[in-house]
Amino acid sequence: MAKFNKKKSGDLPAISTASLPDIVFMLLFFFMVATTMRDTTLKIENKLPFADQIEKLDKKDLVMYIYIGKPQEAFQGKYGKESRIQLNDKFADLSEIKAFIASERASKREELVPFLTVALKVDQDANMGLVGDVKKELRKENALKINYTTKKGDVFANKKN
Amino acid sequence: MAKRSAPEVNAGSMADIAFLLLIFFLVTTTIETDTGLNRKLPPIDDQEVEPPVIKQKNIFTVLINGKNQLMVEDELMELKDLRKAAVEFLDNGGGVGEDGCTYCKGKKDPKSSDNPDKAIISLKNERETKYSVYISVQNELVAAYNQLRDRRAMELYGKTLKEMEANYADVNWIGNKETLKDKIEKIKLEYPQKLSEVQN
């Protein structure tokens, strides 16, 4: 009775992977839309603190970024564990802020220069001493619009000390 | 000749290609944070100008020391109480006559600030103060201003300042943007943000 031969039991039917590309493409598009290209490689630790009274920085091209934080582990041998300033892709001294601001201003159209904002991306464990020094330099350079970049969240989630 | 159907294209490696792209984007991009507290630094003036005399009662001193403790008006305070204390100080309206404040709802304590225009919050910190604590304090002080401004906006126009600003930025909003801007300016003038930052 060959007509009623049972199939061999035990071999599972193959799972169709035809929709796998669709799923992966969906993920891909999400990441393409929601993220931006890294323009600087961070050499410092940069865990931003939380705040809830925040405003959005709208004009992205009119922002200069100054990063402050402890050097990452790979750089600690050379630069120590104290907080450092990072401008563009390298560690910098306080005295280099002046040149940095000047070069950023020179790269923008003249009528846009007054709208330039300095975004201070400071690690939450940094001390205010260095931040205060940076602020003093910025005042000397007349770059008065600043923004303390923070993540959206509850301030009581910040580290107390 | 028999009709030949087009051969099926093998799409089995499509997933691999998509994964490759996905991993590339995961590695080279970051989710940027572009929000924060906007502040304006005071300009350095070289001229030897005598600073105007400010009455002690119009200054609200907030000091964060190197151990990240908070001292407000010479008393130790917890962070959670700061917002309320700042609101009470700003909204006091203890002035009389010309210095009076018609829209304040505070206690009218003559020992505290005259009116919101004269009230100045002075934020001092030491070099050892931790940045996260400093930001928390700044956030609470800005919150105090925002709370008062929102309250005033609700009274006058039935909307919070945030909604009004959102409307102003929204291109699809129907209404007169000029008057809306004047309204926003008026609220901001009634409770001006006078926050000075000093470092010891």
Image: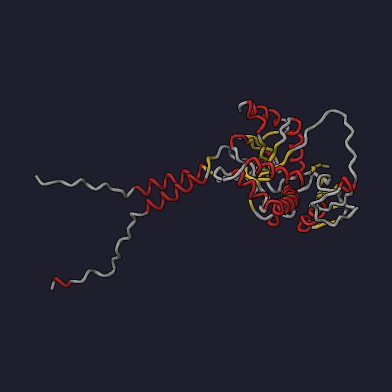
Quarter of the picture holding the C terminus of chain B? top right
Q: Residue A53 in the image: state x and y as whole percent.
A: 68, 50
The answer to whether any part of residue A126 appears in the image is yes
Quarter of the picture holding the N terminus of chain B? top left
Q: Residue B195 in the image: state x and y as whole percent.
A: 78, 44
Instruction: Please name whichever residue, A30 or B167, is drawn nearer the observer in this view of the structure.
Output: B167
The residue under the point 32% across, 58% down is A16
Instruction: Please name whichever residue, B39 or B113, is drawn nearer the observer in this view of the structure.
Output: B113
For the rendered model, the colour scheme is secondary structure
The residue under the point 89% across, 42% down is B54
The answer to whether any part of residue A51 appears in the image is no
Q: In the rendered view, tell whether residue A13 sits above or below residue A91.
A: below
Q: Is A2 positioned to the left or the right of A112 in the image? A: left
Outermost residue on the left side: it is B1
- In this rendering, the count of numbered labels is 0
Q: Residue B9 in the image: state x and y as whole percent.
A: 26, 46
Q: In the rendered view, tell whether residue B75 sits above or below residue A121.
A: below
Q: Is B87 positioned to the left or the right of B1 in the image? A: right
Q: Is A88 positioned to the left or the right of B117 in the image? A: left
Instruction: Please name whichever residue, B156 or B5, is drawn nearer the observer in this view of the structure.
Output: B156
Q: Residue A46 in the image: state x and y as whole percent.
A: 64, 45
The residue under the point 41% across, 51% down is A24
